[in-house]
């Protein structure tokens, strides 16, 4: 009879309360997880409508979901009687330690978020960043990948990119080509200028608006230098530059106009 009383007391004192607490904790976790998934879906939809980059959307929603699930787990553990105050303090200390250990990675992450949000360049743009020039292949959370002209793959930490000067050569539809051509002091300046105008006008890729500039820019030590500045579409920049350099040299040679190079004349007096 005593054993039956002890068992009944044990069930009433421990089994039922613990069973209720475990059931409540499971209910809190399951319902909380459903709510977290719903809120995460809503956030993903809102961010998607804002035309934010998909990489950033995935990262933000994953962080959001993880933080909310952490609160759900803490609430469930609290229902079981676990001292969540100590757990929160432990998580805070662990987060601080991880943050200090990953300081450079966090800096790259923050820079990656800024690159994705403000978009100083996009995939396919030709840029110069962190001392490297190339076509942007990917923009990641921690690093970005560039493809150089000789088909090398360069991976650059985002912190180095965002912390320095970014030159985006593809940001504008048009670019100006800056060239300098020198002729000898004995050559006909007007003839050279007319020839340069003819060469520039003959190239259909050179834009008429803005109008190209051809002018005597400097009377240098060994030459009279013409500045030639035509405008072209960004995609035609290198092709037009190389073509004009070659054409000017050929046309000047045919017209008898010299392109001098730096030289020094030394005069020696004969001893008497």
Image (cartoon, rainbow, N blue to C red):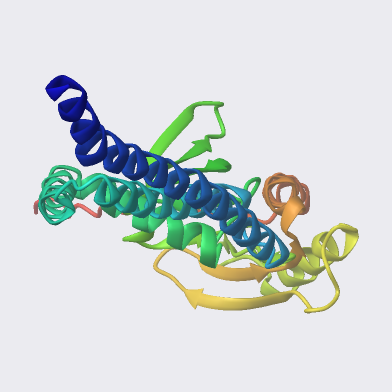
Query: Is residue 28 found left or right of 47 in the rendered image?
Result: left
Q: Nearer the viewer, residue 204 or 24?
A: 24
Examine the image and state in which quarter residue 180 appears: bottom right
- Closer to the camera, 47 or 272? 47
Location of residue 122 with respect to 150 vertically, above or below: below
Residue located 54% across and 77% down the image:
217
Residue 75's place in the image compared with 20, above or below, is: below
Query: Is residue 194 shown to the viewer in this render?
Result: yes
Q: Nearer the viewer, residue 138 or 35?
A: 35
Q: How many marks?
A: 0
The C terminus lies in which quarter of the figure?
bottom left
Q: Is residue 59 visible?
A: no
Identify which residue is drawn at 63% across, 65% down.
187
Q: Position of residue 70 (x, y in %)?
A: 34, 49
Q: Quadrant of the N terminus?
A: top left
Residue furthest front in the image: 1
Q: Nearer the viewer, residue 125 or 221?
A: 125
Residue 73 placement (x, y as % from top left): 34, 46
Residue 250 image offset from top left, x and y in percent: 74, 45
Q: Give the left or right position of residue 78, taking residue 134 as reference.
A: left
Image x and y of residue 168, in percent: 55, 59
């Amino acid at each position: 009879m005593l054993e039956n009383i002890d068992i009944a007391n044990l069930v009433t004192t421990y089994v039922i309360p613990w069973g209720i607490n475990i059931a409540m904790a499971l209910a809190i976790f399951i319902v909380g997880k459903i709510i977290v998934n719903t809120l995460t879906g809503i956030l993903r939809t809102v961010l998607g409508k804002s035309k934010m980059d998909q990489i950033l959307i995935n990262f933000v929603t994953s962080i959001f979901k993880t933080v909310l699930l952490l609160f759900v787990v803490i609430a469930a553990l609290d229902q079981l009687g676990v001292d969540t105050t100590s757990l929160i303090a432990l998580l805070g200390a662990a987060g601080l330690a991880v943050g200090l250990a990953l300081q450079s990675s966090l800096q790259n992450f923050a820079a990656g978020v800024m690159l994705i949000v403000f978009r100083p360049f996009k995939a396919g743009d030709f840029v110069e960043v962190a001392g490297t020039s190339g076509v942007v292949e990917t923009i990641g959370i921690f690093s970005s990948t560039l493809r150089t002209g000789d088909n090398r793959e360069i991976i650059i930490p985002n912190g180095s990119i965002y912390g320095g000067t970014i030159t985006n050569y593809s940001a504008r539809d048009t670019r100006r080509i800056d060239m300098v051509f020198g002729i000898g002091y004995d050559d006909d300046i007007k003839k050279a200028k007319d020839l340069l105008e003819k060469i520039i006008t003959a190239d259909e890729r050179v834009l008429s608006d803005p109008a190209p500039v051809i002018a005597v820019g400097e009377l240098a030590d060994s030459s009279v230098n013409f500045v030639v500045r035509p405008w072209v579409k960004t995609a035609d920049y290198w092709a037009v530059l190389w073509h004009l350099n070659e054409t000017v040299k050929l046309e000047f040679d045919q017209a008898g106009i010299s392109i001098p190079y730096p030289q020094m004349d030394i005069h020696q007096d004969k001893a008497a």
